[in-house]
């Protein structure tokens, strides 16, 4: 009987929840400087969203799936991302903490769910930064070649990755991606110096990046051939079997089935447009990074929704305009390239501008890494303050006022992933973590509306409960498409298993909530359990 009672006690601790009041109280006692305003948060979001999406993924999605219909794909994806963004905006205004979705989950589903969310966010932020670093390396190597500086090909790719030249001929086998390692190290150093300095650098970089993107739209629009937009949605390849009804509902259903079963046969047609929307969905993964800065926002109730929704709206408009110019200059079938915008500029005979585009891409991807690594360090900071990770990860530097040990450890891990893991594996795992985290966020909005109806919400998700429900369903559909790939599924499940072992070995025994202690060192209110409302 004693062992049963003890087991029940530990089970209760696993599902213990923080009260909303406790989370808000922790925000008031944060040791981080509150220096970020609405403009900082807006540029933080734009800096993270605009990166691999515009500079890499747009060409691939157009060439392989949507054709000129990529413009419609961006409209669809922006609309779908708005569901999740509205959920994030409500939670970020009501619970302005540095832990982002981790803290939201702690308040609704309990400690073990919050730990799983922390694992998912490590994939979303930590591996995403490594993924972007690999893309950054590609543009950097290309720029160096334009300047007649050759980096040994074997030092520009992860082990086992084949390095090819412009003629698609294999010229080397990767040993490590040295440029990717060096850029992650540089960004990590900047983050150690301090968030104010990092935010200022990010604002400058975002200004450069936006200037390049807007210039491409303005200059490139003069060279657009409208004939390349026709047909807007190319015929489906392979063609549908005879007798198959081709009404819109059938095509949408077919496309959704292809996404859920990882069937990539939907090339062109309405199904291709929807599949293209699924591909470029991952180009929007930056808007929620704004929510990780809640503890350092001066007025989170007003500024967080502005940062999240404003970044999403601005970037969606830029994506649509950029893709319209892109497919209007270069035939869509020729855009399956790691640097599609540079291809377009070369097509119109402006090599000087192609050089500037690469500079802009390098700056843009640098700002993405800055935001992603920033977000990951703040999540670990919060988990450490909760006792789920070692306390050293929450130590704030006396001079810089940043979690410096935490930042260095995250940077080293990101350096290793960027230097020794391939782009495909990094991208898939990042997407899995992001979509699973988004699903939990949408569910959290629903839960808190029911469990804490009196909670002050400076921003409320409109059209509740339809907005979070549709957001969760959309994320689950796309998540299923990724989990249908055996390698990704196995890697993800092993990763979760290792993470749970760490929780049971450390987090469960050191949890401050389980011990009844808050981060300020005072006695906490009685441990809140799922049924104790």
Image: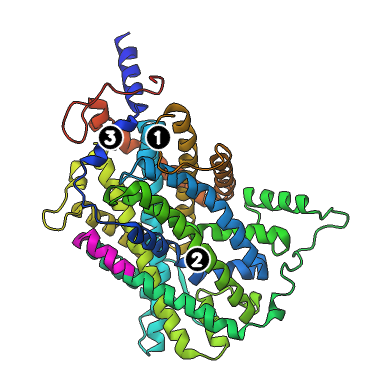
Lateral position of residue 144 relative to residue 70, left or right: left
**Mark number for residue 113?**
1
Check if mark 3's residue and mark 2's residue have beta carbons within 8 Å.
no
Regarding residue 138, the answer to whether it shows in the image is no
Residue 268, image quadrant:
bottom right
Regarding residue 306, the answer to whether it shows in the image is yes
Check if mark 1's residue and mark 3's residue have beta carbons within 8 Å.
no
Crowd rating for badge 1 (residues with CA inside 10 Å; few <14, some 14–19, many 20+):
many
Image: 149 above or below 6: below
Foreground pick, 237 / 501: 237
Under tag 1, what secondary structure?
helix
Indicate which label's residue lies in the foreground, 1 or 3.
1
- The residues tagged by marks 1 and 2 sit, at their Cα atoms, a distance apart of 30 Å
The region drawn magenta spans 192-203
- The residues tagged by marks 3 and 2 sit, at their Cα atoms, a distance apart of 36 Å
Scheme of image coloration: rainbow
Foreground pick, 186 / 71: 71
Determine which residue is flagged by label 3.
Answer: 507
Residue 97, image quadrant:
top left
Q: Residue at x 26, y 26 (%)?
A: 514
Circle nearer the N terminus (1, 3): 1
Q: Residue at x 21, y 52 (%)?
A: 33
**Mark number for residue 53?**
2
What percent of the width, then of the height, locates residue 176? 35, 69
């Amino acid at each position: 009987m004693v062992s049963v009672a003890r087991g029940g006690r530990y089970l209760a601790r696993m599902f213990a929840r923080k009260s909303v009041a406790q989370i808000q109280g922790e925000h008031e006692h944060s040791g981080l400087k509150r220096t970020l305003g609405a403009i900082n948060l807006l540029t933080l979001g734009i800096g993270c969203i605009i990166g691999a999406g515009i500079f890499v993924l747009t060409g691939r999605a157009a060439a392989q799936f949507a054709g000129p219909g990529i413009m419609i794909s961006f409209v669809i994806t922006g609309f779908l991302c708005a569901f999740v963004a509205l959920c994030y905006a409500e939670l970020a205004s009501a619970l302005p903490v540095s832990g982002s979705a981790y803290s939201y989950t702690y308040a609704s589903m309990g400690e073990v769910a919050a730990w799983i969310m922390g694992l998912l966010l490590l994939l979303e932020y930590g591996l995403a930064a490594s993924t972007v670093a690999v893309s950054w390396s590609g543009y950097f190597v290309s720029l160096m070649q334009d300047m007649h500086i050759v980096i040994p090909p074997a030092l520009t790719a992860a082990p086992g990755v084949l390095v090819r030249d412009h003629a698609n001929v294999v010229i080397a086998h990767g040993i490590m991606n040295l440029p990717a390692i060096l850029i992650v190290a540089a960004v990590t150093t900047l983050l150690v110096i301090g968030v104010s300095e990092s935010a200022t650098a990010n604002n400058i970089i975002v200004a450069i990046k936006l200037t390049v993107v807007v210039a491409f739209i303005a200059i490139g629009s003069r060279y657009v051939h409208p004939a390349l937009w026709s047909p807007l949605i190319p015929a489906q390849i392979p063609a549908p079997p005879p007798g198959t009804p081709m009404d819109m509902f059938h095509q949408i259903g077919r496309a959704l089935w292809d996404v859920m079963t990882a069937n990539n046969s939907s090339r062109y047609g309405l199904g291709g447009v929807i599949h293209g929307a699924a591909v470029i969905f991952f180009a929007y993964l930056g808007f929620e990074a704004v929510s990780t800065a809640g503890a350092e926002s001066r007025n989170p109730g007003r500024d967080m929704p502005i940062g999240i929704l404003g970044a999403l709206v601005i970037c969606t408009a830029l994506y649509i305009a950029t893709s319209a110019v892109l497919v209007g200059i270069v035939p869509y079938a020729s855009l399956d390239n790691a640097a599609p915008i540079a291809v377009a500029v070369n097509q119109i005979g402006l090599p000087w501008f192609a050089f500037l585009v690469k500079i802009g891409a390098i700056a843009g991807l640098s700002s993405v890494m800055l935001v992603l690594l920033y977000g990951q360090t703040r999540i670990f900071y919060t988990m450490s303050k909760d006792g789920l990770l070692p306390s050293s990860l929450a130590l704030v530097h006396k001079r810089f006022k940043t979690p410096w040990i935490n930042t260095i450890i995250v940077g080293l891990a990101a350096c290793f992933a960027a230097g020794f893991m391939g782009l495909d594996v990094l991208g898939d795992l990042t997407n899995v973590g992001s979509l699973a985290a988004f699903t939990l966020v949408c569910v959290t909005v629903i839960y808190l509306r029911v469990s804490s109806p009196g909670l002050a919400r400076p921003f409320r998700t409109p059209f509740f409960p339809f907005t979070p429900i549709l957001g969760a369903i959309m994320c689950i559909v796309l998540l299923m498409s990724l989990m249908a790939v055996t390698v990704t599924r196995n890697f993800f499940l092993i990763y979760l298993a290792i993470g749970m072992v760490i929780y049971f070995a450390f987090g469960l025994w050191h949890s401050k909530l389980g011990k009844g202690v808050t981060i300020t060192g005072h006695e906490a209110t009685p441990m809140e359990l799922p049924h104790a409302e």
